[in-house]
Amino acid sequence: MPESARILIVDDEPFNIDLLEQELEDQGYQTCAARSGEEALARVAEYQPDLVLLDWMMPGMAGIEVLRRLRAEPQWRALPVIMVTARASTRDKVAGLDAGADDYLTKPIDDAELGARIRAMLRIARLEQENLTLRRAVQSQVQFKGVIGRSRAMEAVYQLLRKVVDSDTTVLLSGETGTGKEVLARCIHQEGPRRDKPFVAVNCGAMAEQLLESELFGHKKGAFTGAVNDRPGLFETADGGTLFLDEIGETTPGLQVRLLRAVQEGEIRRVGEEQVRHVDVRVLAATHRDLKQAVAEGAFREDLYYRLNVFPIGLPPLRQRREDIPELALHFLGQLRQRAPRAPEGFTARAMDALGAYEWPGNIRELQNEVERAALLGAGEARIDLGHLSERLVGGVPPAPRRGKLKEVLAQVERELILQALERHQGNRTHAAEELGMSRWGLVQKVRDYGLEV
Ligand SMILES: Nc1ncnc2c1ncn2[C@@H]1O[C@H](COP(=O)(O)OP(=O)(O)OP(=O)(O)O)[C@@H](O)[C@H]1O
Ligand SMILES: [Mg+2]
C-alpha cells in the first residue's frame, strides 16, 4: 500500500506544493494538490486521499478549520492528517493535535523525516483498517441461527439481541406483519440460558377472552362448562422456559390485569381456583401495533405496557432493508428445492430486480410465498424469470426507480417497458417494436444501449 498511497498536499504557496509533489512522487506516492482550505475539502471528497499534508497558515480558511470540518464528517474521522507549520509554536501544535491532527512537521521540511512520518502514519492507518475489517467479520460470524439479513437495519437489531439474549429480560418485539417477530423470539430463547427448557408460543389475537384466559392460566375441573378436568395453563407449561405472547396488543383489559400480575410477580391462578401458583417464566411479547399509542387511547394498560417494554426491539419492514432481498430469496428457494427438486436453481437478473423494487407490504412472509409460488410455476426451468412472478410485481407499471435525475428515471422506465414487451413476444424484436410503436432498428439500438441482449 505505501507505494501507491495517495497524498493530498494542501498549501497556499505553489512553490511549496511543487517541492513536496516532486519529493513524494520520487518516494513513490501519488499526489494531488489544493491551494486553499476550501479547495482542500472539495479535493478530499473527490480524490479520497490516504493521507493529507495540511499547511497550517493559509489565507482564508486556515488549516485548523479544514481539520475541524474533516473530523466532523464520520468518513474522514480516521483520515491521517499531518499538519505542516512554519513557525514551530508549541501552542499551534497543541491546538492542531487537539483538533485531530495525527502528527506535525516543521518547515523547512526534511525529506527523510517527511518519508518516515508518512510511512508510519500509513502503517497505523492500515492496521486500524485491518482491525476494523476483522471486527466486522467476527461480528457477522456470531449471527443468529436461522435469521437472514446483513443490512445495516438488521445489524442494529443483532446488536440489541446480543445485549439481551443472555438475560431473563422481558423483550417487546414490534414490527409490521411478516417482519420476523416470531423468528426473533425463538432465536432469543434458543440462544439464551433457557434453551433446554420449553418455548411456548401463544397467539393472543386468535382466541376469545375466556378461552385465552384458560389457555394461559389453566382451569379447575368444573370451572365452566366444558372444563371436565383440571388443566394447567401455558404459563405452567413454560415454567423454567420462555412464554411468547404474540399479538399482545389484542388482549382485553380484563386479561391485561391478570397478565400484569403474572409477568410482574410470576404469580398465576387457574380459572376457578383460589390457590396461587408460582412460575419462573421469561416473557417475550410481540405486536404489530403501536402499543404506546394504544396506551394513549386507553386500549392498553399503561402499567402492563411499561412492564413489557423493558427492552424494545423494532423490526424494520423489508422495504427498508432491500439489500437483504437477494439473500432471503435464495434462502427460501434453497429451502423449497429440498422439497421440490425440480424447482429452478436461481433467479434471472431482471426477476431479482423486480423482487428488489417491490414494496412488500407483507414483508418477509410475502417474499417467501412469492418465491415458493414462482418456483412451482417455473419448475423444470433453470431460473425463475419475470413471467413466473405475480402480476403485482411485474404488472403494467414499471417499478418506480427510487431516485435519480429525470433523464435516468426515464431511461429506467424505457428499459423496463422494452424488457416487458420483449418478454411478451418471446424475444421477437419485430413484434415488440410494433407494440411499442417504434422501428425495429430503433428497438435493436435500445436493446444494445441498455444491455438487454441475452
Ligand atoms: N430474518 C429472517 N430470516 C429468515 N426468515 C425469516 C426472517 N424473518 C422472517 N422470516 C420468515 O418470514 C416469515 C414471517 O416471519 P414471522 O412469522 O416471524 O413474522 P411476524 O413478524 O411474527 O409476522 P406476524 O406479525 O404476521 O405474525 C416466516 O416464514 C419466517 O420464517
Ligand atoms: Mg407472528
Image: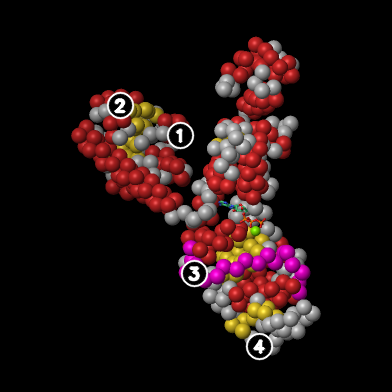
On the image, numbered disc 1 is attached to which residue? Answer: 45
- Which of these two is toward me, 98 or 121? 121
Q: SS at mark 1?
A: helix
User: What residue is shown with label 4?
Assistant: 275
The residue located at (24%, 29%) in the rendering is 27
- Does 136 appear above or below 448? below
Tag nearer the camera, 4 or 1: 4
Q: Does the CB distance between marks 2 and 3 fall below 8 Å?
A: no
> What residue type is disc 3 on?
Asp
Mark 1 within 8 Å of ligand 1, using the beta carbon: no
Q: Nearer the viewer, mark 4 or mark 3?
A: 3
Q: Quadrant of residue 232?
A: bottom right
- Give the foreground label among 1 and 2: 1
Which label was assigned to residue 36? none
Whether residue 40 is in magenta: the answer is no
Q: In the rendered structure, which amino acid carries the disc numbered 2?
A: Glu
Residue 91, compared with residue 355, is above or below; it is: below
Circles 1 and 3: CB distance less than 8 Å?
no
Q: Is mark 4 within 8 Å of ligand 2?
A: no
Residue most extreme to the bottom: 274
Mark 1 or mark 2: whose residue is earlier in sequence:
2
Label located before the other in sequence (1 or 3)? 1
Question: Which amino acid, by three-letter code, is at mark 4?
Answer: Gln
User: How far apart, in angstroms, are the residues tagged by discs 1 and 2?
Assistant: 20 Å
Say left or right for 312 vs 434.
left
Q: Nearer the viewer, mark 4 or mark 2?
A: 4
